[in-house]
Amino acid sequence: MTAPAILLGLTAALCWALGQTILKLAVDRIDLAILGLIRWMSVLPLALGAGLLFLEIRFTSAPDVWGMAGLAGVVDAFLGTGLLLYALRRTPGHQAVSLANTAPLWGVLASVLFLGDPARIPVLVAAVLVSVGAFLLVSRGAGRRSKSSRGMGTIAAVFTGIMWGIAETVLAKYCLDRGMSPAGLLIVFAATASFCWSLLLVGTRFYRRLVFDWRSAGIGVGSAVVGAFLGWIAWLSGLELSHASLLAPVRGMTVLFGFLAGVILLRERPASRAAIGAVVVTAGVLLVATAG
């Protein structure tokens, strides 16, 4: 794996960690459908502007590629983001972000199974280390929520990781390899997600009153700029330079960055075993960086 691909993967990991963690400050004060729509509607003009000014906007006429790009938006930015927001409401930020970012394990397995990437043993070991480290980073019994509520949040975060892992490797790599540019893919991705969030917002409005908060909306925009836009541009650019299965474990640094962001920005106090998890995650990233 090339140094630029690793750097882009680490940049994406940092952006995603910050973008996901600050959402914790907003999820209790605004309807999640509004927050999700604000986040991905904000990405559309950013992706268009970046594509026109700095990057290349390139699509394809192949309907299967358009279908995969749209599916990626549904799986990752709608379903995955929705589960993350649900998890953030019910568990501490460092827990939700850590478990959601076990995505490298699922990304490596999916890229080997569906993209035909070689099943390199060091890479598979690295993906497992990142995922084990994420679970160690989770503090037992933390937070003010009930045990059952935290349990549901934990399950939601794990399923977020599964969806993100598949969308960020198999679906995204499929589109990039068949002619879509990173900016073009992100435009389709954000447009599809925005459409799904709009439908959810309209449906929700029929049976209950929506809750809105300006500060939370601003946090949603900030999360979009840092995480959904900068993070995705860096990630997709890295995918153009490397095998998906090699880059996916590097993305696991989101676990460590998200853990640190939860401690620093949210002032959370994880259990002492979290330090072990941080070491395990770092070991996994170093392994994949040297194995390529």
Image (cartoon, rainbow, N blue to C red):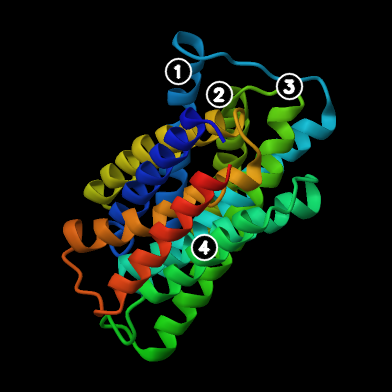
In the displayed structure, 253 sits above or below 135; it is above
Label 4 vs 1, first from the N-terminus:
1
What residue is shown with label 1? 50
Check disc 2 and give the amino acid type: Ala
| CB under 8 Å between discs 2 and 1 | yes
Q: Which residue is mark 4?
A: 102
Closer to the N terminus: mark 4 or mark 3? Answer: 4
Secondary structure beneath label 2: helix
Quadrant of the drawing holding the C terminus: top right
Asked whether 137 or 201 is in front, the reply is 137
Which mark is drawn over residue 22? none
Residue identified by numbered label 2: 183
Q: Position of residue 153 (x, y in %)?
A: 45, 75
Q: Position of residue 104 (x, y in %)?
A: 56, 56
Between 181 and 223, the one nearer to me in the picture: 181
**What amino acid is labelled 4 in the image?**
Thr
Give the alpha-carbon distance from disc 2 to disc 3, as whole Å. 12 Å
**In this view, the mark in front (1 or 3):** 3
- Give the percent coordinates (x, y) of residue 51: 51, 16
Residue at the spot x=25%, y=58% of the render?
A: 260
Against 206, is 186 above or below? above
